[in-house]
Image (cartoon, helix red, strand yellow):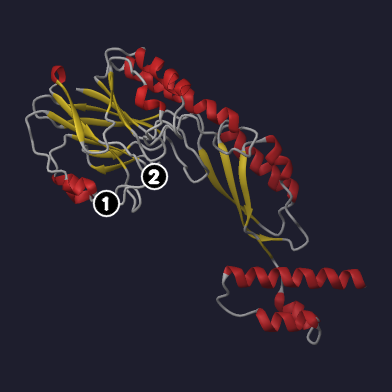
Amino acid sequence: MKFIHTGDVHWGMSPDCDRPWSRERSQAIKETFEEVIRQAKERDVDFLFIAGDLFHRQPLARDLKEVNYLFSTIPSVHVVLIAGNHDRIRMNSALMSFTWCPNVTFLMSEEMSSAVFEECNTEVYGFSYYTPEITEPRLSQMGITDNGRIQILLAHGGDNSHLPIDKNSLSLSPFSYIALGHIHKPQIVLERRAAYCGSLEPLDKTETGAHGVFFGEINPVTRQVTALEFIPMCQSQYISLAVNVTPKTTNMELASRISQEIQSRGLQHIYRFFIRGMRDPDITFDLDILESRFRIVEIKDDSEPQYDFAQLFAEHPSDMIGFFIRALQKEDMSPVEKKALYYGINALLKTKDERS
């Protein structure tokens, strides 16, 4: 039996909503989900498992129709899904009256339920969210036993507010595979037995690295997963890079280095830059022009001005500059204390220059 495990698609979301590329990212979510459907067809899978949060919010009828059309293009694939905390089921939801195409099974119950697929000797279990949070560890008290079928669990959660999960309880369960959603970083929880698919496209700057789906195969006799492969599919990645500077680094040089990094890694990606090291006290890095040319979500300047505090104190032993250095400088200064010292000295030196 072959399957694709996805989830946390967040159809309808506009990542980086305050950025000019937000609309493109919203479209990328839909296009990448279309690619998942194509992969399901090309790989001739038996199941497409969607472990919650297919939609970013309560889906409208038009959203359901769009997604249902995609499912209809893979009629030989069993699509099984649950609702997560974002697309949780409400009594007035369009989901309640929507008719899915014949190959779609939505485990809509708030309690654990299952669907049996006799031709694959497979039973798929899961339940959907009806509330924003589920704080009880419901997977630790399932009471499900081995029944001779390939048993699959779909579950959405993994933190204290959303279905806390005990890894040991999962390892003792009879499931051949546990398809998890909610945690947006793709990861294996139990070797060839349980995994988080992660968000299909990265949705904010903290979701670095490749995103995609898991493709797996289960032996129908042993009912064990024989292969589990992560397939990167996202159009863009959030990439965090540190750039080191020295007192000789100029603003133009730094801008050129950052520009080269982006062009070598790919213009389609979204970048965070952290500037580190010691800089010339007279230099202020102004990189706004880069943020208008590239997909840069953040530039954080953690560089420190290279003041010679000993020399400054010798030159100003009895004025405000010397007093400020004596009051604040010490060994093992915290980052906040360092910033206070640097900003204070910078301001005092500028004030002195203006008066001279």
Q: Residue at x 65, y 36 (%)?
A: 294
- Residue 343 picture location, percent across and down: 72, 68
Q: Could you tell whether 27 is left or right of 318 in the image?
A: left
- Using residue 97 as the reference point, say whether residue 168 is left or right of it: left
Asked where in the image residue 291 lies, by quadrant, the reply is top right
Residue type, label 1: Glu
SS at badge 1: loop
Tell me the quarter of the image containing the N terminus. Answer: top left
Seen as rendered, the residue at the extreme bottom is: 318
Looking at the picture, how far across and down is residue 257, in whole percent?
66, 43
**How many neighbours does mark 1 have within 10 angstroms: few (below 14), some (14-19), or many (20 or more)?**
few
Question: What residue is shown with label 2?
Answer: 132
Which residue is the site of mark 1?
136
Looking at the image, can residue 267 be seen? Answer: no
Instruction: In the rendered structure, find residue 180 and report the number of the disc placed on it.
Output: none
Crowding around mark 2 (Cα neighbors within 10 Å: few <14, some 14 to 19, many 20+) is some
Q: Is residue 95 above or below residue 130?
A: above
